[in-house]
Image: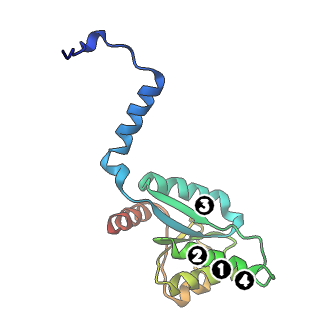
């Protein structure tokens, strides 16, 4: 004989059972099954606070974004630079988009120049944007050489992130 318990008189669920139920609900949402997307960030360590603001903004637009960055303090011509370049190359390869985040100290940095050229060599989707709206902020030479437009931050970036998310 099979008895069907009346839901009104069933045992209360434990905290663990409630958490498991919530987790199952999250896992089986259609959004949860979408793949993660990696974004490589090119910036100067001096602009880290503005970069964090950008990451927070971008995560709000596309929560599937995972950010990869190297805030380098190793000189470009250092003996460890070959190893560092190899590590960076692997991370750029694993990325679906590269953000070049241009701040006040961005000009004439050998690492930035190399990372941009390496991203272009790999034919990565590269987006360059200003970290602030100062009129004196100009696109670095590497971006000008390759005719990459330096975009202002804001609504245009939101649309670009969304478009890129739907392309993948």
Q: Is residue 4 left or right of residue 160?
A: left
Q: Which residue is mark 3?
A: 51
> How far separated are the C-alphas under marks 2 and 3?
21 Å
Looking at the image, residue 35 sits to the left or right of residue 4; the answer is: right
Instruction: Evaluate whether residue 108 shows in this view.
Output: no
Closer to the eye: label 3 or 1: 1
Examine the rendered structure and indicate whether residue 59 appears above or below residue 140: above
User: What's the CA distance linking mark 4 and mark 3?
Assistant: 26 Å
Q: Nearer the viewer, mark 4 or mark 3?
A: 4
Are the two marked residues, 2 and 3, in contact with CB atoms closer than 8 angstroms? no
Residue highlighted by disc 1:
86
Q: Are marks 3 and 1 in contact (CB under 8 Å)?
A: no
Kindly identify which numbered label has been placed on residue 101.
none
Q: Mark 4–mark 3 contact, CB under 8 Å?
A: no
Measured in 3D between alpha carbons, the distance from the residue under mark 3 to the one under mark 1, in whole angstroms, is 23 Å
Q: Few, some or many C-alpha atoms within 10 Å of disc 3 (few <14, some 14-19, many ≥20)? A: many
Which residue carries the number 2 mark?
90
In the figure, is residue 62 to the left or right of 78?
left
Task: Quarter of the image for the C terminus: give it.
Answer: bottom left
């Amino acid at each position: 004989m099979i008895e069907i318990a009346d839901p009104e008189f069933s045992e209360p669920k434990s905290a663990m059972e409630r958490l498991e139920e919530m987790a199952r609900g999250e896992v089986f949402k259609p959004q949860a099954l979408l793949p993660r997307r990696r974004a490589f960030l090119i910036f100067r360590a001096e602009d880290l606070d503005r970069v964090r603001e950008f990451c927070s903004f971008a995560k709000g637009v596309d929560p599937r974004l995972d950010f990869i960055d190297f805030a380098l303090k190793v000189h470009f011509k250092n003996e460890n630079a070959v190893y560092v370049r190899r590590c960076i190359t692997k991370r750029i390869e694993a990325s679906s988009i590269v953000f070049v985040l241009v701040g006040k100290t961005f000009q004439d940095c050998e690492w930035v120049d190399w990372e941009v050229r390496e991203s272009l060599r790999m034919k990565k989707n590269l987006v360059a944007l200003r970290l602030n709206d100062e009129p004196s902020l100009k696109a670095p030479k590497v971006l000008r050489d390759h005719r990459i437009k330096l975009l202002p931050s804001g609504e245009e970036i939101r649309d670009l992130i969304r478009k890129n998310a739907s392309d993948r």
